Image: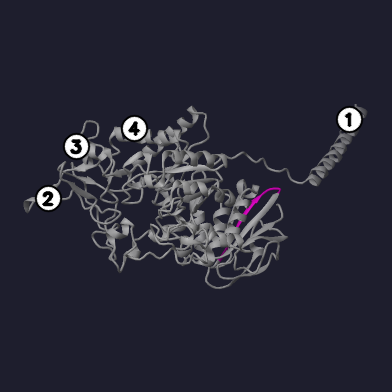
């Protein structure tokens, strides 16, 4: 028995030794091979794309009338390919009296004549798709022009249209029975009361924007059904998705919840506002009503069903949502059983950051979105649009390359407003040339620029020729910015270094696995400088180091996590002394005011 135990002990010992040897060999082989590359899960077309917003009236004029048009866009499709853009979103091109330049639609099923024809639109879709570029349309469900057939029929109380819009009886003045009072104290986004008297119908109608933009009644089933019909029509025409305009305003407080009357809103107490300016009241009854989310969820169900029924690529819905972060995140869905928009636009770089913000502000604002965003959803980043001051004018011109690089390096979808790729700034538009309804309604020759959106809408600056190459006409719908000889696309293509060349290098970089599939780390290195690192096991790491301050700043890169030497420059601001392939120490580095460096580092 003892002999048997001894033999078994020898055998087990030998097996253990062999196991150790085999394990050591296996470990050595694995170690020599390095870590296993992670699986790169295929992304849907929209999940990591670059979306470029076109303001068609100001992009390219093909017929010399001084107004941009669809054929003009067609002639410049190669620009989007060159710039690395995956989708273009066009502000409205539908039939409109142009009170709000397309956001007051009178015919949702046809193209505005000065922009072109349906055949032009179909050609645009076909040629863009051939180049791999998606087409996103502006979908304007909140309101229609008072010149629309919908409104005319509603005024006449035609059957099926009686309640298409928000109508209300006047309040009788208790001190004078012949005096008519508005139903509530609500203020329009463009100034003045939201209520406009219609003599023919003998009621007020509600308009949250211009008087000529009557709000649809989304508590009316026929309205909701018509919105789906419009969505279906343009899907069938080839649209790849919609930007959902002004949806925080879809619903107002229900008078049935307030004794049959529309409730007044409390005053904000803001001493800088007059009683006819938006923000004078709290707007708690005129925006962000909880009912609107169900409508967005219904639109998502419709879009997904249309996609499945037609065996088509994903049709996306993007929500314009100026709201607090909690209400904004509800647009993604209810995190239980209903999906919402593919994403709500992230306006934090517009609403929460400016030239006065420091590096810690940037880090905080970026982390806030990514923290509140529901699990598994896709982030997005917006630095400007047709309603806001241009990016270099809100921040500083020397920050253009850093801001564009930040946009391209953050996880998710990057959104560019036309002209940001070349650093276009707000153009000067005199009071005499001002056409924006928001400025005309609320402003005067002394203060109109506080309200005007025209400076962000001046024509695109293509080259140094007549009207910056936007039009052959010397008279354009808005004046061309006076700096077009200095800032234009052609000059930047010809320059050794330029904003456009930096932009192109950053859209190319987005194809790197660290950016498309990797993790992120962001930290402030000082009051003025922060670092954003994108990394993925076995793939090159990339880092943005950006001084957002107004003075030079020295920081220590050795404190940045997930960053290993050697560090080489992939891209840099046009005013930087560093150029591509320069080596940067992982230690003390000084950056000029506004300077940004994009660094390539060894794989982790």
Q: SS class of the residue under badge 1?
A: helix
Left or right of residue 440, residue 327 in this image: right
Query: Label 1 neighbourhood size at 10 Å, few (<14), some (14-19), many (20+)?
Result: few
**Residue 372 is one of the magenta-drawn residues:** no
Read off the residue under disc 1.
8
Task: Name above or below for residue 173 compared with residue 257.
Answer: below
Q: Are marks 4 and 2 in contact (CB under 8 Å)?
A: no
For disc 2, the neighbor class at 10 Å (few under 14, some 14 to 19, many from 20) is: some
Q: Residues within 10 Å of mark 3 (few under 14, many from 20)?
A: few
Q: Nearer the viewer, mark 3 or mark 1?
A: 3
Of pointers 2 and 3, the one earlier in the residue sequence: 3
Q: Which residues are magenta?
A: 529-538
N-term mark: 1 or 2? 1
**Label ID, residue 180:** 2
**Disc 2 vs disc 3: Cβ atoms closer than 8 Å?**
no
Residue 394 screen position, x and y as percent: 45, 63
């Amino acid at each position: 028995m003892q002999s048997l135990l001894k033999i078994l002990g020898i055998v087990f010992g030998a097996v253990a030794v062999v196991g150790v040897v085999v394990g050591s060999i296996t470990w050595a082989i694995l170690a020599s091979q390095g870590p296993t590359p992670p699986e790169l899960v295929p992304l849907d077309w929209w999940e990591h794309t670059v979306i470029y917003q076109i303001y068609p009236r100001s992009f390219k004029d093909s017929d010399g009338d001084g107004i941009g048009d669809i054929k003009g866009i067609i002639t410049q499709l190669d620009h989007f390919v060159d710039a690395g853009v995956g989708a273009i979103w066009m502000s409205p091109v539908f039939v409109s009296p142009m009170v709000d330049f397309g956001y007051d639609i009178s015919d949702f099923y046809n193209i505005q004549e000065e922009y072109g024809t349906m055949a032009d639109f179909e050609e645009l879709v076909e040629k863009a798709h051939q180049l791999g570029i998606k087409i996103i349309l502006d979908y304007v469900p909140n309101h229609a022009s008072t010149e629309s057939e919908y409104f005319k029929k509603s005024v006449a109380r035609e059957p099926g249209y009686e309640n298409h819009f928000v109508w209300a009886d006047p309040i009788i003045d208790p001190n004078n029975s012949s005096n008519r009072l508005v139903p509530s104290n609500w203020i329009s986004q463009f100034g003045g009361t939201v209520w406009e008297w219609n003599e023919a119908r003998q009621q007020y109608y509600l308009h949250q924007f211009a008087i000529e933009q009557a709000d649809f009644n989304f508590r009316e089933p026929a309205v909701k059904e018509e919105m789906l019909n419009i969505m279906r029509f343009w899907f069938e025409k080839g649209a790849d998705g919609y930007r959902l305009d002004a949806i925080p305003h879809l619903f107002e407080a229900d008078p049935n919840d307030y004794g049959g009357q529309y409730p007044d809103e409390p005053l904000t107490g803001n001493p800088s506002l007059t009683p006819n300016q938006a923000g004078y009241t709290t707007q708690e009854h005129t925006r962000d009503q909880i009912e609107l989310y169900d409508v967005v969820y219904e639109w998502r169900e419709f879009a997904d069903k249309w996609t499945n029924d037609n065996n088509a690529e994903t049709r996306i819905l993007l929500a314009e949502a100026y709201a607090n972060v909690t209400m904004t995140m509800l647009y993604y869905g209810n995190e239980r059983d209903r999906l919402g928009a593919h994403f709500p636009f992230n306006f934090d770089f517009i609403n929460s950051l400016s030239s006065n913000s420091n590096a810690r502000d940037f880090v905080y604002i970026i982390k806030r979105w990514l923290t509140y965003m529901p699990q598994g959803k896709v982030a997005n980043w917006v630095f400007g649009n047709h309603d806001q001051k241009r990016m270099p004018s809100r921040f500083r011109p020397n920050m253009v390359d850093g801001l564009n690089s930040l946009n391209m390096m953050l996880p998710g979808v990057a959104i560019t407003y036309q002209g940001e790729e070349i650093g276009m700034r707000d153009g000067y538009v005199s009071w005499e040339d001002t056409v924006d309804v928001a400025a005309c309604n609320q402003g005067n020759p002394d203060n109109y620029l506080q309200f005007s959106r025209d400076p962000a809408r001046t024509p695109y600056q293509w080259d140094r020729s007549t009207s910056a190459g936007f039009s052959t006409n010397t008279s354009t719908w808005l004046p061309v910015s006076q700096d077009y000889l200095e800032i234009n696309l052609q000059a930047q293509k010809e320059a050794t270094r330029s904003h456009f060349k930096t932009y192109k290098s950053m859209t190319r970089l987005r194809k790197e696995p660290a950016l498309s599939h990797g993790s992120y780390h962001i930290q402030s290195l000082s009051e003025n400088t922060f670092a954003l690192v994108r990394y993925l096991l076995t793939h090159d790491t990339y880092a943005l180091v950006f001084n957002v301050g107004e003075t030079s700043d020295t920081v220590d890169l050795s404190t940045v996590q997930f960053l290993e030497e050697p560090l080489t420059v992939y891209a840099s601001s046009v005013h930087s002394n560093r150029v591509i392939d320069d080596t940067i120490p992982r230690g003390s580095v000084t950056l000029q005011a506004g300077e940004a460096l994009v660094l390539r580092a060894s794989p982790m």
